[in-house]
Image (tube, grey):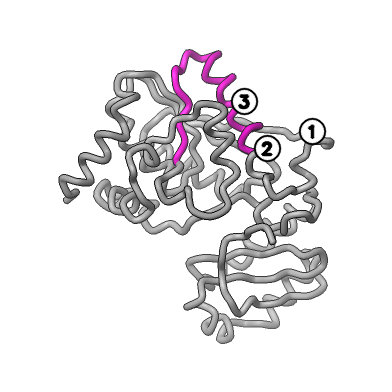
Amino acid sequence: MLTNALKYKITQAISPVVGKPVLVAFSGGVDSTVVARILKNVCNNIKLVTVTSEWISRQEIDEAKEIAIQLDIPHETMNVEVDKEHVFWENPSDRCYHCKKLIFSQLHDLAMREGYEIVIDGTNASDTDGHRPGLKALEDLSVYSPLRQGGLTKIEVREIADFYKLSVAKKPAMACLASRIPYGEEISVTNLSRVEKAETFLRTLNLSSQLRIRDHGNLARIELAPESIKDVLSKDIPLIVKELKKIGYRYVTLDLEGYRPITPD
């Protein structure tokens, strides 16, 4: 059961959009799925939109489609293309600002064309910690973040997901493929594809609840949840090295500090 305090937070989160037509940026992660579920019965009209592009893995897109079907909410994908001269490819420390501005500008255009009054995303109250340049883009474009506005933390969002028995309740946090490239190192379709292929392979081995490939040119640095690092040594290390070299890496390393969000130096 949800506590009265948590119910109150949910009420505060959804109150500005009750009865209104809304368009939800939907990644299929825990946050956007909880947003979709709590808005489903209170909004006059709701559509979920999943962005597709070179920096979003196909596995995430496929999962988002499946979860939208589970939620029984209208859903579509929207491809976002980035001009080759766009600052995104330079990978500055505020890359997320430029990326989110590009994405949510197009979501706003879609909302206006189709009569949706508000664009919504899944940012929660814990997402204000650390290096978060993307938040400014959301504010600049008047994107409404109900979880953040309601003061709902990551832990509370998972409690809500458990309450509604959502299939994503235990799903680990994800981030776009561009986050695997250290700030200041140029992003290309080639290194994004290499990261996606490497992570797709490693997930078949069930190494960890958290898994990232950090791309350093010809070197792949594998990050796992710290508690999982010892377990990888019992896996077939030669197979991992062989497959990642086949994908295009020359060196394959395991980061002994484990998974952590990437931040500017």
Q: Nearer the viewer, mark 2 or mark 1?
A: 2
Q: Is mark 2 in CB contact (under 8 Å) with mark 3?
A: no
Please, is residue 232 above or below residue 53 in the view? Answer: below
Residue occupying image coordinates x 43% and y 41%: 32
Residue at mark 2 to residue at mark 1: CA–CA distance: 12 Å
In the image shown, does 133 or 81 lie closer to the viewer?
Answer: 133
So how many labels did they put on this image? 3
Between disc 3 and disc 1, whose residue precedes? Answer: 1
Q: Is residue 100 magenta?
A: yes
Which residue in the protein does label 2 denote? Answer: 98
Please, is residue 84 above or below residue 180 in the view? Answer: above
Residue occupying image coordinates x 56% and y 22%: 108
Which region is colored magenta? 98-122
Q: Mainly helix, strand or loop, the magenta region?
A: helix
**Label 1 residue SS:** loop
Q: Which mark is residue 106?
A: 3
Which residue in the protein does label 1 denote? Answer: 83
Residue 62 quadrant: top right
- The amino acid pointed to by label 3 is Gln
Q: Is mark 2 in CB contact (under 8 Å) with mark 1?
A: no
| Crowd around label 3: few <14 · some 14–19 · many ≥20 (10 Å) | some
Between disc 2 and disc 3, whose residue precedes? Answer: 2
| Crowd around label 2: few <14 · some 14–19 · many ≥20 (10 Å) | some
Q: Is residue 252 magenta?
A: no
Please, is residue 89 above or below residue 240 in the view? Answer: above
Where in the figure is residue 218, as x and y percent of width and height?
A: 82, 67
Q: Nearer the viewer, mark 2 or mark 3?
A: 2
Residue at mark 2 to residue at mark 3: CA–CA distance: 13 Å
**Label 2 residue SS:** helix
| Crowd around label 1: few <14 · some 14–19 · many ≥20 (10 Å) | few
